[in-house]
Image (cartoon, coloured by chain):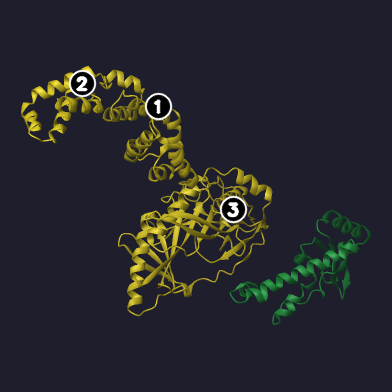
Chain colours: A green, B yellow
Amino acid sequence: KRRILTGTYVLSAGYYDAYYLQAQKVRQLISDDFTRAFADVDFLIGPTTPTPAFGIGQKMDDPIQMYLNDIYTIGANLAGLPALSVPCGFSGGLPVGLQLIGAHLSEPALLKVAHYFQLETDWHTRVPAAYA
Amino acid sequence: MKWEVVIGLEIHAQLATASKIFSGASTTYGAPPNSQACLVDLGYPGILPVLNEQVVRMAIKFGLATNCKISRRSVFARKNYFYPDLPKGYQISQYELPIVSGGHIDIVLNDGEIKTIRITRAHLEEDAGKSLHENFHGASGIDLNRAGTPLLEIVSEPDMRSAAEAGIYMRKIHTLVRYLGISDGNMQEGSFRCDANVSLRLKGEKELGTRTELKNLNSFRFVEKAIEIEVERQIEILEDGGHIVLETRLYDSDRDETRSMRSKEEANDYRYFPDPDLLPVVIEDVLVDEIKDSLPELPDAKRIRFVKEYALSDYDAGVLTANLGTADYYEEAVRSTTVASPKLVANWVQGELAAALNRDGLDIAESKIASAELGLLTERIEDGTLSGKLAKEVFERLWHGGGSIDDIIEQRGLKQISDSDAIEKLVDDVLSQNPTQFEQFRGGNEKVIGFFIGQIMKASGGKANPKQVNAILRKKLNE
């Protein structure tokens, strides 16, 4: 509901320029930033989420904290880039994801890199201790 | 009158494509309800719109024919509002960047004066479904066949100053879209709809008064009547010292009055934003040039050419060119004969043919007499074989049973009597059989000539050549 209302609000009369239009401009800057990065590298890697999984209902009172959990995956979506996540280990017994982002239309190569990673590692076969 | 009437028209013309603007579903009118709405039209989750190329071409055609600027880059936007006949909850339209804008057309007013009406813009959008409120026992039926049908919304500047001007402009646009082949302009079927924005201001005043928007104007006549009645209503309010409320009013043709539909203050905030599912429409010069070369001769140019080439009056040329089908039929008929004068052919197309089509409710394309046949008929009149009156009889026979003109003339013995000896005899007979009237003529009564002519025509079974009868009769009377 919050997402729907926010979306409606930023498009409404008097707020379109300040929010929606401005956001689209920022989005273009983000996209351009990625384009510049891919002039130098083939892929970007980083953590998929800022923290491992938290308890059910733990952050319900803080919507901003909830939204911030997506912060590392928003970029690829804003820029329209292919990205994926593969298991890369554990922290405190909880699984951690490695994010791979490629340039536009680099899906074949992206999938190959992920596949090679999984040939060299076995994190993706392991089950967290609490559920073994 | 101290008030100046200011009118702008918004016309929605359905574009005559085979499939919808953003999906492959059919646009054919009259199909069973909800049989021509695919998942894209129904707005199911996950669907994506794909632009129909034909609509872009049609919009460019219209833009070129109305001196508009063709936008080399135009954008589709979402117009958001909730209504049962709008499946997606938004209508895909164009907002800030319409496909064509800044044009004008000339209209000829009733007194012959030519006035330019500016066209602000024309943009592409999809039609919504249809809501039916009768026959559902307190509920409403929704037919989504129409959802997704392409529309060209044509917006004029508020340049019109009377209901009559608005009617002329609307008819001009109606003729134009049919000439261009982009819309069938069928108002009964809803493929040509018009809303009027009406406001008043004191003569000489530069600022616009508050306007009302009139909707539900289903015919040319209703558009004019609704505007007239609304102007009266507004004058009454203003003269009483009141204010006009910015609102939408529906025209009720039965009561000849307008009723408030909704106040514009309660109007939706449509929250326009560019549709993320559709790319901007990029138009290359090559396409514009190609379409420019393919434009048909437009109504005004055709009318002017008819006046010059066929020596017709401006009025006749106007009537013949109001409908492209009629204009083509007329030219084919004229070209099929080297004997009949274009003026004579024009009289027959506007007269007998039009009357027969009207009577049987037919379009010219369904005429029971082909253009070449009509050409031959007028040739037979021009070459003296048929009198005008008997030609009408031949026309009726042709219309109802076909056959060939010459056969009919032969079989019915309708050939005009042009032999002077035969006519002289008829004249002599009638004069000698009507001594009383002859004396009246001698006594100075000129009117009795008509009586003689009537009698002669009757005696000849209507076949005597009227011109010769007249000439020979007068000669004999004056001997």
Q: Nearer the viewer, mark 1 or mark 3?
A: 1
Report which residue position mark 3 lands on: B39
Task: Left or right? Give the position of A37 relative to B329.
Answer: right
Which image quadrant: the C terminus of chain B?
top left
Q: Nearer the viewer, residue B121 or B150?
A: B121
Q: In the image, is B449 to the left or to the right of A75?
A: left
| Disc with the residue nearer the chain's start (2 vs 1) | 1
Across and down, in percent, residue B40 comes to 60, 54
Q: Which amino acid does the dot numbered 2 rest on?
A: Ile
Q: From what the image shows, is residue B18 above or below residue B386? A: below
Q: Nearer the viewer, residue A47 or B395?
A: B395
Whichever of callouts 1 and 3 sits on the residue coming sooner in the sequence is 3
- Per the model, the C-alpha gap separating discs 3 and 2 is 78 Å
Residue B339 tag number: 1
Q: Residue at x 68, y 50 (%)?
A: B285
Image quadrant holding the N terminus of chain B, namely: bottom left
Determine whether the residue tagged by mark 3 lies in a helix, strand or loop. helix
Residue B395, above or below A120: above
Q: Is residue B143 visible?
A: no
Q: On the image, numbered disc 2 is attached to which residue? A: B423
Marks 2 & 1 on one chain? yes
Residue at 42% over, 31% down: B371
> The residue under label 1 is which amino acid type?
Val
Q: Residue furthest front?
A: B479
What chain letter is assigned to the residue under label 1?
B
User: Subunit of mark 2?
Assistant: B
Against B452, residue A13 (above or below) is: below
- Residue B181 % position (x, y): 52, 45
Sequence-earlier tag: 3 or 2 = 3
Q: Residues within 10 Å of mark 2 (few under 14, many from 20)?
A: many
Q: Is residue B73 visible?
A: yes
